[in-house]
Image (tube, rainbow, N blue to C red):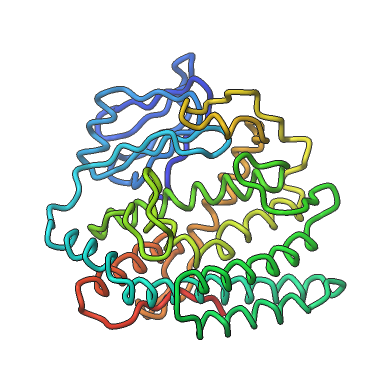
């Protein structure tokens, strides 16, 4: 089944025989599913879990992510990692090799830029009034990324292409959702709140896929290592940003699934750990809007697409695992090149 998102304030996760049960604050059942069908659990806000349910889910290999209403990861509980110390040592050795990191980072940056260009072209076809010049700027960034010989230059090309892409993205939004630029911590408007929340969800999905493949989500090749930041997960997030999150955000906005008045300014100190005081404020979705967004996000994850390496149609959620396993084979020396997932 898709990832289980629990958002009801005061809800509680319980175990009932071989099933997982979600009840509200009054003890009324909200949701029930066989334990074997649950793959991930994401708790949003003030949701509880019984010890029996937690132990049963961990025994079944299910991880928990706890995030705030604004999308900040507050904590993560995972089953014991695969006991392959040799794989982890090789990952860390590869992460210390500048040449290896540059080539993996190049593939990741090119995957992101090419998927952004493909999505931007779709936007321009649907909105003929949007000038196409920024698509050419993305193409030039792709050409530049192919030639760059150092990480700083590669990041510069990726950033240039992303700015051009977001100019197109912003132009396609329905009136009332406009924003000047991407703002993250905190998001300064409802559209940025949707993007940031979606990217947080995507990061949790990618972390799970990397853990399934036996890799350490915190030691990456493109993103610089920063204490507490899942650098490798953020690496793999890049090629899926436009395909998953941006696509969902554009859909829920332009199809009026959500409206700007369904957002509220986050109260100071909203569910933020003390170590993130600079991230207070911003915007967050109200309860019913949050549920509709999660339904749209989950539907996107369960969309089937042809994966080149798999040679068949699999869901986007399975694509995350396929990319994680491909990265593992690269680290182990079983393949020579990492190929990002590209849309047509």
Nearer-the-camera pick, 267 or 148: 148
Viewed as shown, does residue 166 lie left or right of 131? left
Viewed as shown, does residue 55 lie left or right of 307? left
Q: x, y percentage for residue 276?
A: 50, 32
Nearer-the-camera pick, 170 or 58: 170
Question: Quick check: 338 above or below 214?
Answer: below
Q: Residue at x 61, y 38 (%)?
A: 290
Question: Quick check: 125 above or below 298?
Answer: below
Viewed as shown, does residue 246 lie left or right of 261? left
Quarter holding the C terminus is bottom right
Q: Quadrant of residue 15?
A: top left
Q: Quadrant of residue 156?
A: bottom right
Q: Residue at x 29, y 67 (%)?
A: 325
Q: Residue at x 74, y 75 (%)?
A: 134
Question: Quick check: 270 above or below 91?
Answer: above
Q: x, y percentage for residue 201?
A: 49, 47
Q: x, y percentage for residue 236?
A: 42, 63
Viewed as shown, does residue 99 lie left or right of 200? left
Q: Residue at x 50, y 63 (%)?
A: 238
Q: x, y percentage for residue 289?
A: 66, 37
Q: Quadrant of residue 266?
A: top right
Nearer-the-camera pick, 5 or 234: 234
């Amino acid at each position: 089944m898709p990832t289980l998102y629990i958002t009801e304030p005061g809800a509680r996760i319980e175990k009932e025989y071989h099933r997982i049960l979600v009840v509200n604050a009054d003890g009324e059942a909200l949701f029930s599913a066989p334990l074997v069908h649950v793959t991930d659990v994401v708790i949003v806000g003030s949701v509880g879990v019984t010890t029996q349910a937690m132990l049963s889910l961990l025994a079944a290999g299910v991880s928990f992510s706890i995030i705030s209403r604004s999308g900040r990861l507050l904590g993560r509980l995972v089953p014991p990692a695969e006991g392959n110390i040799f794989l982890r040592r090789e990952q860390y050795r590869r992460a210390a090799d500048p040449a290896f990191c540059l080539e993996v980072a190049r593939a990741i940056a090119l995957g992101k830029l090419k998927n952004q260009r493909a999505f931007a072209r779709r936007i321009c076809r649907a909105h003929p009034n949007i000038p196409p010049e920024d698509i050419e700027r993305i193409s030039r960034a792709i050409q530049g990324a192919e030639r760059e010989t150092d990480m700083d230059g590669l990041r510069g090309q990726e950033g240039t292409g992303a700015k051009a892409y977001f100019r197109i993205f912003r132009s396609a939004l329905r009136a009332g959702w406009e924003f000047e630029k991407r703002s993250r911590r905190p998001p300064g408007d409802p559209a940025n709140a949707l993007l940031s929340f979606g990217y947080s969800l995507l990061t949790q999905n990618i972390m799970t896929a990397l853990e399934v493949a036996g890799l350490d989500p915190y030691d990456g090749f493109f993103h610089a290592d920063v204490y507490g930041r899942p650098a490798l997960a953020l690496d793999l997030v890049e090629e899926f940003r436009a395909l998953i999150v941006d696509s969902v955000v554009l859909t829920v906005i332009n199809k009026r699934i959500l409206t700007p008045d369904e957002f509220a300014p986050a109260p100071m100190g909203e569910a933020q750990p003390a170590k993130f005081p600079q991230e207070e404020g911003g915007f967050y979705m109200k309860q019913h809007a949050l549920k509709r967004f999660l339904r749209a996000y989950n539907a996107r994850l369960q969309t089937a697409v042809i994966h080149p390496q798999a040679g068949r149609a699999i869901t986007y959620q399975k694509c995350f695992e396929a990319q994680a396993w491909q990265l593992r084979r690269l680290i182990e020396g079983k393949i020579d090149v990492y190929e990002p997932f590209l849309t047509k």
